Amino acid sequence: MTDDFLKQLRYAGEAFGLAVLFLVFLVLPAETASNLGGWIGRSIGPKLAASRKVRHNLNRVFSDITETCSDEIIAGMWEHLGRVIAEYPHLETLALGHTQIIGQDNLQNALNNPNGAIFFGAHLGNWEINGAAVLLQAGRKVALSYRAPNNPWSDKLLMRARTLGGRLPAYSKSRQGGKAMIETIKNGRTLGILIDQKYNQGVSVPFFGLEAMTNPFFVQLAQKYGCALVPIRNRRLDGASFSLSVYEPLTVFEDDGKPRAIEDVIRDAHTVLEEFILETPEQWLWLHRRWKDS
């Protein structure tokens, strides 16, 4: 058997397992599915080898963190991730009936900006709810930016869930996807993007005091097309209940109209995300290789 055949076989097995999980969670009420996913995540996650990476990242960011505190954050992160996975089949229900949008004026200002808007955030709360909540509660589409998994079959399952069966546009972080995102902003529409993943070809800007490579694309778009650059935050309140907070846009131009240095805008964006993460560290995805050697 060829390596390609074995890879396809592995992809098929992974996608089948994901489909079975989704089916199990689908037949359960949203709250029950979330609780079950959280229990599975907390029971299994801390025992996985990946938890060593999480602990390493915690020790780098919080130099004086105790082992007990690390254990609590690690267990909480895995519970939270388990809930997120279990909630995929229920995104429409959760976005409409379990999510409170805070900062309605900021949201409407962004949606009504003739130059469009970019909502930026991090893998916090259930980040997959953000676009769905704006669509279902405000009646406006937000184009989603995402990093496609290597497994194309799993990608299709996840895409169907996050786009509510195709009602939301979604573009992968690729050359073709980048062109589609540019067209979205050029046409005065809105784009949602998460900026907390490492991008090797990006700009080095401190994140929690450690140099981190960040994709400058969201700032470049805002400065080229004059769209609003709006921080958003999804926060899990209790079980399967959430808040989606929309904040005032960042300043991307100087008083004289000249673009601010991209590094300075990214630094402001990082500061916003740091504040969010510090409030609920267990709700951030510490599994990312966000920093060099992490």
Image (tube, rainbow, N blue to C red):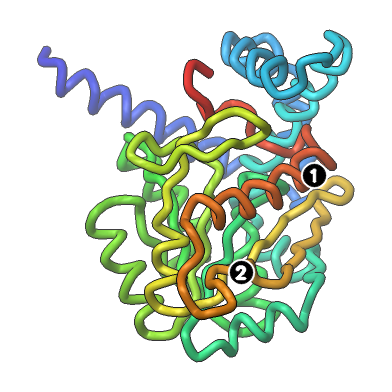
Mark 1: which secondary structure? helix
- CA distance for labels 2 and 1: 42 Å
Mark 2: which secondary structure? loop
Residue at which label 1 appears: 32
Is 239 placed above or below 16 here?
below
Q: Earlier in the sequence, mark 2 or mark 1?
A: 1
Residue 152: name its quadrant. Answer: top left
Quadrant of the rendering where the N terminus is positioned: top left
Residue 62 point in image, percent of width and height: 77, 21
**Could you classify mark 1 by the number of other residues whose Cα lies within 10 Å: few (under 14), some (14-19), or many (20 or more)?**
some
Residue at which label 2 appears: 251
Residue 54 point in image, percent of width and height: 65, 19
The mark found on residue 23 in the picture is none
Residue in the picture at 65% in, 62% down: 231
Q: Is residue 231 left or right of residue 8?
A: right
Looking at the image, the residue that sits furthest to the left is 2
Residue in the picture at 61% in, 36% down: 207
**Could you classify mark 2 by the number of other residues whose Cα lies within 10 Å: few (under 14), some (14-19), or many (20 or more)?**
some
Would residue 17 be seen by someone viewing this image from the given angle? yes
